[in-house]
Amino acid sequence: MVPDTRKALHPDALRPVNMPEEVAVEEDGNGRPRALKGKRRQPLLAVEDSWRLDDEWWRALPLSRLYFAVALSSGQQLVIFKDLRDNRWYRQAY
């Protein structure tokens, strides 16, 4: 059981959940992910699925993303996407 701290909640104490996190990705010649780059390079074992999302067309900046469900050589499974508006890669948990 969590103790009651009697502290009031404030809107500034809240934070968004599941926000995309920018990651460095090494691409192959076709623009598909080959490895994650960070403190150390993590090669991809497989791209298990891929899909494109074009949404919110009515907004000034609509979404346009290429998603990839990937398996890393460490065995970890991730969903990453390339934002086609800014050409940056992101990781997002689901």
Image (cartoon, rainbow, N blue to C red):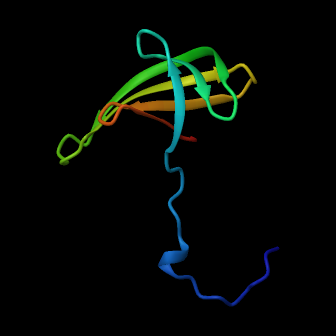
Residue at image position (49%, 45%) is 20
Number of marks in the rendered image: 0
Residue at 41% across, 10% down: 30
Residue furthest toward the front?
Answer: 39
Across and down, in percent, residue 15 comes to 53, 65
Give me the residue at 46% from left, 31% from top.
Answer: 81
Q: Nearer the viewer, residue 17 or 45?
A: 45
Question: Which residue is at a point 55% across and 31% down the rendered structure image?
Answer: 79
- Quadrant housing the C terminus: top right
Rendered location of residue 38, percent (x, y): 63, 34
Determine which quarter of the picture holds residue 42: top right
Q: Nearer the viewer, residue 2 or 60?
A: 60
Name the outermost residue toward the top. 29
Q: Is residue 80 left or right of residue 56?
A: right
Q: Position of residue 28 (x, y in %)?
A: 48, 12
Relative vertical location of residue 61 with respect to residue 70 in this rendering, above or below: below
Q: Quadrant of the N terminus?
A: bottom right
Rendering quarter of residue 72: top right
Instruction: Work out which residue is located at the far right of the displayed protein and give it.
Output: 1
Q: Position of residue 82 (x, y in %)?
A: 42, 30
Please identify the quarter of the rendering in which residue 65 is found: top left
